[in-house]
Amino acid sequence: MPAPGRAHVEPSDGYLSFLEHARRPGGGYHNFLSYQRHWLDTEGSGDCQGQAVRALAEVLGSTLPDDYRVLARELIETALPALADLRSLRAQAYVILAWGYLWTTRVKGVERLENVAWSRPSAWWNAITVPCDRIGSGSSRG
């Protein structure tokens, strides 16, 4: 993979700075920032947590400079407690996508994220099979 050019590195500064600023002390990220730079939420939504980790995985699995990847790893690690409590399937899907990207790019040391990503297989199975059962029950074939 070629080294990222200046056009990729400069925006990454701002994005990573924002996520570092949005990091909550107990894990996870804030979502809404006022123009006065005050957080308007006590904790970000599940969707916010999932999207943040998905974006950080892109940095961690990239060829950006090492200090960017070190910060991305740290931000993912500190978010793990909040990720373990996600209830939204979409938010959980972002976490699975983040882990999947890191797995395909062969990033080492992401076992804790993997554990969080796959901690609720029954929720995924129910989300997939319940709609299929409903569709199948109305079928003229069976």
Image (spheres, rainbow, N blue to C red):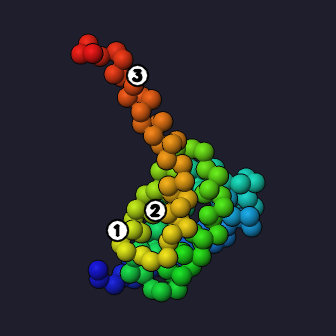
Residue 89 got which mark?
none
State the image quarter where residue 34 is shown: bottom right
Percent of width and height locating residue 127: 47, 36
Task: Report if residue 85 is visible in the image.
Answer: yes
Q: Which element is circle 3 on? A: helix
Three-letter code, disc 3: Arg
Q: Residues within 10 Å of mark 1 (few under 14, many from 20)?
A: few
The residue sitting at 40% across, 22% down in the picture is 134
Residue drawn where x is 52% and y is 41% of the image:
123
For this orientation, the residue located farthest to the left is: 141
- Expressed as whole percent of the image width and height from the top left, the position of residue 54 reads 48, 61
| Furthest-top residue in this view | 140
- Residue 84: percent from left, percent from top: 62, 56
Q: Is residue 58 above or below residue 46?
A: below
Q: Is residue 61 above or below residue 80?
A: below
Q: What's the mark number on residue 134?
A: 3
Q: Give the Cα distance between marks 3 and 2.
A: 30 Å
Which residue is drawn at the image coordinates 57% and 44% (left, top)? 88
Which residue is labeled 1 in the image? 104
